[in-house]
Every structure is written in structure tokens, then in C-alpha cells.
Amino acid sequence: MGSALARQLAKSHEVIIGSRDPAKAREAAKGIRGARGTDYQTASKEADSAVVSLPYSAIGALGGLSGALAGKLVVSVVNPLKFEDGLLHDSMEKGSAAQELARALPKSRVVTAFNNVPARFFTKDEVMAMDILVAAPSKEVFEEAAKLVRSIPNLRPLYAGPLTEAETVERMTALVLNLANLNGTGVLTTRFVSAGG
């Protein structure tokens, strides 16, 4: 998901891919025009905002980036999923990965977004119309994240409420993936239709 999202964001932003292994980051950046790769610390220091797309188990290790990411928007794309009895489930009994990330990065403005979009939707040149659910600590921070979402054409950011609602947003990911698998539809994502008036 990180590489697919970076490919779309690189069309209108300078993208820096960070990794524990800078060689892997540089390799990932090779296929994305305008992107470059480096280590986590350098990427965090140089970025205006950050998108965190990594396994849930690695969130704790990001506490060391707290200083470098202080005062910055940090978008969590982390989904704490587990596979059990033929279905995907949220692996957290309570709370969300985004809230955990916010605790690890107390001086950052942490939101959750892009969680319900499988990477395949971002691999095509033109992204189809989708709704991106954003849970944020305030409406002002949502607006900041929404600007980043809108920088990818055809994406509509929807305010899902405070960061506590990240739990609901993350749990929807399991639902979306299970619906696709159980119904043989191929990959699905979120789009909400208004009746108007």
C-alpha cells in the first residue's frame, strides 16, 4: 500500500520513502518518478507531513521519530488485522492503531485515512472515484488531511469524527476485504451515495 499510495502522491508532491533499510527505500523509489528513498529518521526530518504504512506490530518502533515528526501531520494507513476461521478480523480488542500511533507521536497531528482502500486501486494511472474516511483529532486537522486526500484526483475525503472513530474506520477494512472474498466480487472499496436533499 505504501508504494502504491506514494505513486499517486508523487504526481503532485515531492515524496520521500523511508525505511529501516535505506537501500530498500531507494529501490522502492526507483519505480516512482520524483520519489527518493532514505532512512526513517531522515525522511521524518525532511518531510512536511508523513504517511505511515507498515505492519501494526512495528508501530511501537516509531516512538523514536517523535522529535522529527513533532508538529507535523501524520496519516496512519495501518490496519491491525488477523486471519481467523476463514475471515479477517481486527486484532485489537479496544482502540485503534491510529490511537496507538498518536500515543507514540504525542507532538504530531495523527489522523487515520486510506485504510479501506486496497493497494490495487492506486496502481492504475487514473484513480477511480472513492470516498476516503478520515478520523482526526479535530475538524481543523481533518481539513489539513483532506487537502492531502484531494491532491489525488477523484478522491473525496469524508470526516469520520474524532480519532476515537479510527477504531470503526479500521474495523471496516476487515469488512470490505471479507465482503470481496465471500461474494467473489474482486477487490472492493468505499463509496457512499447520497439521496440528496
Image: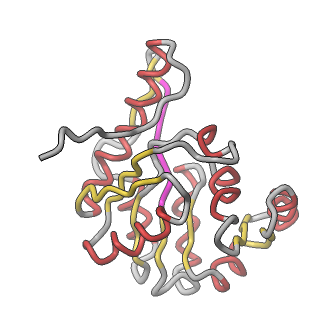
Quarter-wise, where is residue 183 in the image? top left
User: Image check: 79 left or right of 135?
Assistant: right
The residue under the point 28% across, 70% down is 137
The magenta stretch is 76-83
As drawn, 33 above or below 47: above
The residue under the point 36% across, 58% down is 134
Q: Residue furthest front?
A: 197
User: Image check: 27 left or right of 57?
Assistant: right
Please say whether residue 78 is one of the residues in the magenta stretch. yes
Camera-side residue of 181 and 64: 181
Q: Residue furthest left?
A: 197
Quarter-wise, where is residue 22 in the image? bottom right
Q: Residue furthest top?
A: 183
Horizontal and vertical percent position of residue 95: 30, 52
Horizontal and vertical percent position of residue 98: 40, 59
As drawn, 179 above or below 18: above
Horizontal and vertical percent position of residue 24: 83, 59
Quarter-wise, where is residue 192 in the image? top left
The residue under the point 35% across, 38% down is 172
Please say whether residue 35 is one of the residues in the magenta stretch. no
Horizontal and vertical percent position of residue 79: 47, 46
Q: How is the image coloured?
A: secondary structure
As drawn, 90 above or below 11: above
